[in-house]
Image: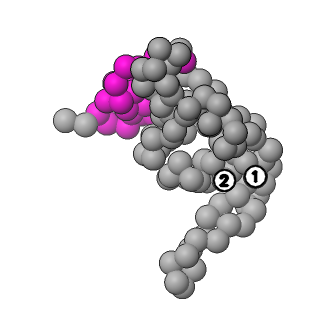
Amino acid sequence: MPVMVRLGNMNNNPTWRFCSCYFVAMTTIIDIMKSHKANGGHFFDKDTMRYFQSKCYPEVFGDYFITSEVSPEGEMRYTLRHFSREDWSITTVGDFFAYKNLSDAIEEARTLSGLPRKQ
């Protein structure tokens, strides 16, 4: 299944092209957003993000990333997400609003992705 990949050019301005390769490193949240949208996804649509008062943490941990949302009580909480390279879907890992602070969400994302813990 083709995916959108970011290619650099001489001016260091990224351009996007479809690629039929299966594994493409998703190094930024923008990479995930573009691939998800190019394959019909709506998770990152402005209306969806606005409805849930959701924001994406910019760092990506393998296929995992973190969003923040505002609870009905007005409290900022964090949710761990997974990007599937098989069907381009976004799923919630664990519970919605699972983390009270960003550092706990980051540690869990690093653990699940196999990245070493920060000292």
Disc 2 marks a residue whose amino acid type is: Lys
Circle 1: residue type: Ala
Image coordinates for residue 45, horizontal then vertical, percent? 69, 43
Residue drawn 53% across the image and 48% down it: 29
Element marked by disc 1: helix
Residue 17 against residue 22 in the figure, above or below: below
**Which residue in the protein does label 1 denote?**
38
Read off the residue under disc 2.
Answer: 34
Q: How crowded is mark 1: few (under 14 residues within 10 Å), some or many (20 or more)?
A: some
The spot of residue 13 in percent (x, y) is 55, 76
Residue 73 vs residue 90: left or right?
A: left
Give the residues in magenta: 96-117
Q: Do the residues labelled 2 and 1 touch (CB within 8 Å)?
A: yes
In the rendered structure, does residue 91 fall within the stretch colored magenta?
A: no
Query: Disc 2 to disc 1, how far (Cα)?
Result: 6 Å
Of the pair 59 and 119, the residue shown nearer to us: 59
Task: Identify the residue at horizontal 37%, vertical 19% (top origin).
Answer: 100
Reply yes or no: does residue 103 show up in magenta.
Answer: yes
Where disc 2 sits, the SS reads helix
Residue 13 image label: none
